[in-house]
Amino acid sequence: MKFSDSEEVPTSKPVSTSRHAALSPSRVKELRQCPLKFRLRTINRIVEQPSKSALRGTLVHRVLEQLFTLPQGERTEEEAMALLEPSWEELCESPIHDTEIFESDKEFREWYASARPLISAYFRLENPNGLVPVGMERFVEAVLPSGLAIRGVIDRLDKSPTGELRVVDYKTGKSPNPRFQDDYIFQMRFYATALQFAEGILPMRTQLLFLKDARTLTYDPPAESVHETVRELEDAWEEIEHRCDNDSFLPRESPLCNWCNLQHLCPAKGGEAPETSPEGVEHLKTAIRPVP
Ligand code: SF4
């Protein structure tokens, strides 16, 4: 492990042309929260330093993914704790994860120890020995009838003995107050819709496991939810196209600004935003695929 002693210098990633764009649940959530934030991240592709809590989330996800490679009966809390170190080493070696964000050894050790209670909490929510996953970190991509491409990554997909699917997603934060559950339920509707269009199967159940306070949010998507979600995604895309055509990705201030890493590029916070990238817009519009 190395430690960082430098301040974050925002840069922008080159626009990848290797694959077409697609809407994901997090992009839609960002658009709804703040159009400028959406534009800076998705179109300008500003690279942000990963937060320590996001890195902890990646580590815990990796441990839980590896847990299910063990045979049923061996998926114990002790085994999961033993997976922490190899999972961390793997992240350190990965070119896509920036693990050099700690100021001191003490800070790193406290952070590393804080992953343990999250792993323990997982075992209070379910017994992994009785589960049969048919996918871990399952990439799902679909094209809606309008030609709009959508994609996401499902943490775990389980299949019951009678063939029903269950989508499971891990969250290392706290469960939301019921007044703020809509974004989370949207994420579950999104995955259900993507599976329906990609594989022709509507999952019977979707669940978010919140590890900070060991709570589960369950949503069983009815067939009508697919139509509703398609309509919402197409509305979001229409809004994106309108904002691209008018270069109108305006800042939308809210209490969430307190957690925004892009304040220094936000005119509402005294910063100066870069121009909208024309290449970024062009790439984003590849989310509309030719309809056969
Ligand atoms: S600081 Fe607030 S208004 Fe500005 S980009 Fe971030 S979320 Fe949007």
Image (cartoon, grey):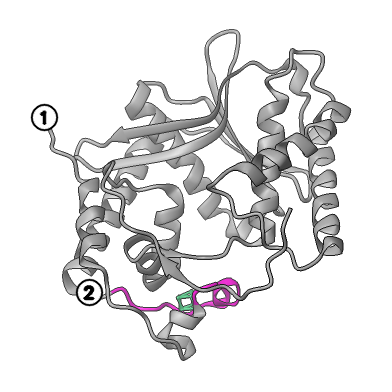
Q: Secondary structure at mark 1?
A: loop
Residue 253, magenta (yes or no): yes
Q: Residue furthest front?
A: 2
Q: Nearer the viewer, residue 166 or 260?
A: 260
Residue 117 is situated, as x and y percent measured from the top left of the image, at 85, 46
Q: Secondary structure at mark 2?
A: loop
Q: Is residue 38 visible?
A: yes
CA gap between label 1 and label 2 equals 30 Å
| Magenta run includes residue 35 | no
Task: Please tell me which residue is depicted at 40% across the width and 55% down the height of the picture.
Answer: 28
- Numbered mark located on residue 273 in the image: none
Q: Is residue 205 left or right of residue 197?
A: right
Q: Residues within 10 Å of mark 2 (few under 14, many from 20)?
A: some
Count neighbours of disc 1 (C-alpha within 10 A) and say few if under 14, some if 14 to 19, many if 20 or more. few
Which residue is disc 2 drawn over?
Answer: 247
Residue with the mark numbered 1? 292
Point out residue 50 in the picture as x, y percentages from the top left corner: 59, 60
What percent of the width, then of the height, locates residue 71?
74, 13
The mark tally for this picture is: 2
- Magenta segment: 249-262
Sequence-first disc among 1 and 2: 2
Against 183, residue 144 (above or below) is above
Which residue lies at the image location 13% right of the left edge and 35% below the top edge? 291
Q: State which quarter of the image contains the C terminus.
A: top left
Amino acid on which the number 1 mark rests in the picture: Pro
Mark 2 is on which residue type?
A: Asp
